[in-house]
Image (tube, rainbow, N blue to C red):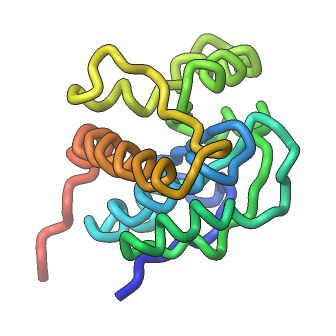
Amino acid sequence: MPRHAEESAPEKSVSEAFRICVVCTGNICRSPMAEVVLRDLVDRAGLSGRVVVTSAGTGDWHVGEHADPRTVEALRARGYDGSAHRARQFEGAWFDELDLVIALDRSHERVLRSWARTDEDKQKVRLLLGFDPDYAGRHDVPDPYYSDAAMFDSVLAMIEHSSAALFRQIEPAFPRSPAL
């Protein structure tokens, strides 16, 4: 069964949910990949509704556009569906609704922290690779935009690995209800 990605924005109405937004530059390559992968991990763990995953870009160049076709294809080749994605730009007001803001590289991290209004908001901003001990010493997920399909596949593999590491760290905070 194909994995899916539904476009969703941070919502205050899901008050108990842990809200994550993954951010890259234009929200058409890396962050849509990470959104789809993290949402799949959440869904497979039965935590839909308890963990909400969205994505955005630091820039507004691609707002409203689909993910890059190479992103959609790389995702499709691994059994994910990124076709519903529409790019959007991160807004500083979202910090109030988010629990974790995942930057894909240090430039995104700097921009996001500059948009944060409080120290608490700044603490919400973390690098994806920082959750993955296998990438110790590395900080940035490479931008595949100016490269070929093989680079998109390589970036997706890195995102899958690091997203799994991130998910292993947050999953214990959501105990399962006993089966009836």
Specify the farthest residue to the bottom.
Answer: 1
* Residue positioned 67% across, 42% down in the render: 146
Note whether residue 16 is visible: no
| Apparent side of residue 48 relative to residue 88 in the rendered image (left or right) | left
Percent position of residue 50, x then y: 41, 59
The answer to whether any part of residue 163 appears in the image is yes
Residue 35 in the image: state x and y as whole percent. Answer: 52, 55
> 123 left or right of 119?
left
What percent of the width, then of the height, locates residue 180? 12, 82
- The vertical placement of 103 against 1, above or below, is above
Question: Is 140 situated above or below 4?
Answer: above
Residue at (51% x, 35% y) in the render:
100
Residue 79 vs residue 21, the one in the foreground = 79
Q: Quadrant of residue 86?
A: bottom right
Q: Quadrant of residue 94?
A: top right
Residue at the image position 35 percent from the left and 88 percent from the top = 1
Residue at 35% in and 50% down: 157
